Image: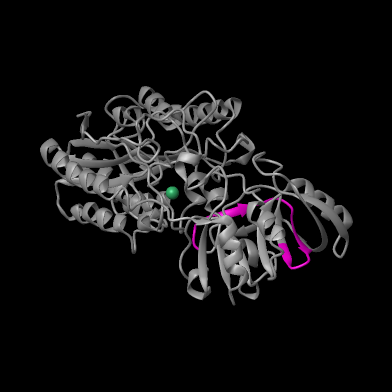
Amino acid sequence: MTKRILIAGAAQEVSTFNPVFSTYEDFNIAVGEEVIENKIGKNSEIAGMVDVLKTDSDIEIVSSYSAGATSAGPLDNASWERIASEFLEALKPFAGEISGALFAMHGSMSAANELDPEGYLLAESRKILGEEIPIVYTQDIHGVTTAKMLKHADGVSVYHTYPHVDFADTGSRAAKQLLRQLNDGTKPVVVRVPIPALVRGEQLITESGLFGNQVSYLKELHNDPRILNAGFQIGNPFTDVPELCSQVLVVTDNDEEFAKEVALKAASEFWDNRLEMQADLDPLEESVAKAAKLKGPVIFTDAADAPSSGASGDSNAIVVEMIRQDYPHTVLVPIVDASAVVRAVEKGIGGRITAKLGGNLDRRFTPVEVKATVISASDGTFPLEKWPSIEHAGPTVVLEAGKMTFVVFSRPINLVDRAPFYANGLDPQKFHSIIVKSPFCEPEFFDDWCEINLNVDAPGSTSADLPSLGHTICARPMFPLDEVVEFVPEPEVYSRR
Ligand SMILES: [Zn+2]
């Protein structure tokens, strides 16, 4: 008998320390078959789900709705309510018509009046679809799975890589769990162990860091037939919500004891490594002074203003310090400033403008005045190098001010590779210094050809100096926000079958 499996999605990662709210207009919305069509053939969770489901000739795949946006500030309430209502309305025609559902989520959404949007969507979806329908969701390693999500789902599959490359694989693990449940009658038991620690830094790079060894342990367990899914979530430390934490999530086939054993072992190793899983930051003033003396190329990593983590992208902190120190080299700077773009477009290519760059969105930065020539203009639409994403920066201009070249975007976009530069006719390798607004990038993008990558301790809404951010909502005490933090493992068990 043909079984219909429904696919839907809702994903955004927010920094609640970014003062600018996200809106409905920031989201790519897909309805009906578009949900799958837009993702198929790409390294995406939904493509991974479809690939697995297609191996079963008795499955018919249907899709309802997806909403996805670049990381940014939390959603304003009207926008969140619209997305939630569209997601749930699109689900209603499938009530009583499907055998299972897969949701591609991020896990670090947040809205003005709803601090657990994915939990809400899962709880309401459960009401619509009924208690018997298995629902498995996927999430980012930076997601925050909550008790509410697990109460209403049968399982979760999370990324095993950072920087993330296993989008499709994560979707396929979710689909495999769902198929086993439908075809073999497995009874998923989820155990989660919350860990009161927030982590950052290069030890989290799964290819080379300590965290990679820990993830490998859980990843290899997938060869054991008792394991349906297993992974870590480290939360997005910038999404200050009640259940923000790191956690281990293990889904077994009806084996609570084994799930607990595995989850506790992983959690205890993670806790032991927490001190090493913190960012090693280079002071701003010293970084600029040091780079001034280097041959280059020098990468200035400004993770505190990483739009991919939820920041506004309009920090000028490093530029201001360079101007103060009369920095002697060429610098390539990505920055968000819609009003500067408007003025540059009015003047046209070759025109001269005086622009106050940066600090128009996030008021912790003070706009800095530069006299610049307009070099080029583009529509700001381009694909990223590896992520399966088309970026929409809105009108974009290149401004040249002395030795500084600014790529100025109208809207925050993912600045995780070289694509934002290439799309505007700029080769980063032709500059002495390049500001990169992403905590980590694939090595070939920058690290393989630079002399040094300075991880700068600049201010910003996604600063790796976590105590500087001022968390007020997550459970305390929390390492490294508080001095004395104890870890008393308390496994939570969720089972719907
Ligand atoms: Zn992530």
At x 82%, y 60%, the residue is: 372
Outermost residue toward the bottom in this view:
295
* Image position of 445 (left or right of 100): right
How is the model colour-coded? Answer: one colour
* Quadrant into which the C terminus falls: top left
Q: Is residue 3 magenta?
A: no
Whether 76 is drawn above or below 200: the answer is above
Residue 97 figure quarter: top left
Q: Is residue 58 visible?
A: no
Count up the numbered dots. 0
Q: Which residues are magenta?
A: 386-405
Q: Is residue 395 magenta?
A: yes
Residue 150 figure quarter: top left
Across and down, in percent, residue 109 comes to: 48, 36
* Image position of 382 (left or right of 440): right
Which of the pair 158/295 is nearer the observer? 295
